[in-house]
Image (cartoon, helix red, strand yellow):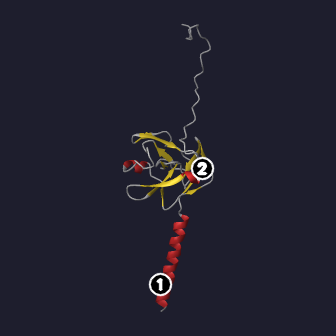
């Protein structure tokens, strides 16, 4: 009788642990300030990107692409963190049946070379046939701020606008 009770207690504890894990592992999308502005990030603080080749909410990034650009996967509905519009969050089914998180209809991906939270090394890269962009809270792609030029303008010009010879 004791064995059955001990087995029952063990099974009950495992069931509680499994439920706690499923509940606490919800996929959260939040907003973070980075060097390129406010961008969407996953629960780990890493930047999320959209792929220009994804013309619909269906992902076109598989195999080698998905190795470099891992999709943000979810079990159930994703949660909206501070600054993120819950109404823009959704999911789409991948070929393997797993759910990938979408935002404003864009499937979301991490970049494997973003090793630290807030890194944006994938921003503006062209890989696997299209460009990759971080997303803002509105669901629009974030563009790197225009660089400033270090070449000073000419100080002397001729009437044609060219420097004198």
Instruction: Give residue 152's position: percent from left, percent from top.
Output: 60, 21
Instruction: Give residue 134's position: percent from left, percent from top.
Output: 52, 44
Residue 7 is marked as 1
Instruction: Give residue 91's position: percent from left, percent from top.
Output: 48, 55
With respect to residue 66, does 151 lie above or below? above
Q: Mark 1: give few (<14), some (14-19) or many (20+) Cα within 10 Å.
A: few
Q: CA distance from mark 1 to mark 2?
A: 45 Å
Label 1's element? helix
From where the camera sits, is residue 79 visible? Answer: yes
Q: What residue sits 60% from the left and 50% below the top?
A: 31
Q: Mark 2: give few (<14), some (14-19) or many (20+) Cα within 10 Å.
A: many
From where the camera sits, is residue 110 visible? Answer: no
* Outermost residue to the bottom: 1
In the displayed structure image, the side of residue 120 where residue 130 appears, left or right: left
Q: Would you say the residues marked 1 and 2 are in contact, meaning their CB atoms lie under 8 Å apart? A: no
Which marked residue is nearer to the observer: mark 1 or mark 2?
2
With respect to residue 57, does 24 lie above or below? below
Sequence-first tag of 1 and 2: 1
* Residue on which disc 2 sits: 31
Instruction: Give residue 47's position: percent from left, percent from top.
Output: 53, 48
Label 2's element? strand
Q: What residue sits 47% from the left and 88% below the top?
A: 4
With respect to residue 161, does 38 lie above or below? below
Residue 23 is marked as none
- Residue 96 is drawn in which quadrant? bottom left
In the displayed structure image, the side of residue 82 where residue 12 appears, left or right: left
In the displayed structure image, the side of residue 108 where residue 156 appears, left or right: right
């Amino acid at each position: 009788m004791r064995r059955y009770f001990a087995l029952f207690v063990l099974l009950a504890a495992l069931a509680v642990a499994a439920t706690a894990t499923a509940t606490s592992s919800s996929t959260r999308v939040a907003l973070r300030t980075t060097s390129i502005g406010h961008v969407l990030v996953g629960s780990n603080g890493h930047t999320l990107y959209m792929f220009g080749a994804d013309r619909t909410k269906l992902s076109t990034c598989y195999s080698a692409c998905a190795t470099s650009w891992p999709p943000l996967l979810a079990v159930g509905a994703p949660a909206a963190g501070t600054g993120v519009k819950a109404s823009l969050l959704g999911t789409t089914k991948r070929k393997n049946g797993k759910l990938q998180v979408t935002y404003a209809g864009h499937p979301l991906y991490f970049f494997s070379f973003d090793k630290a939270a807030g890194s944006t090394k994938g921003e503006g890269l062209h890989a696997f046939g299209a460009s990759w962009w971080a997303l803002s809270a509105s669901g629009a792609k974030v563009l790197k701020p225009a660089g400033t030029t270090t070449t000073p303008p000419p100080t002397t010009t001729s009437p044609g606008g060219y420097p004198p010879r």
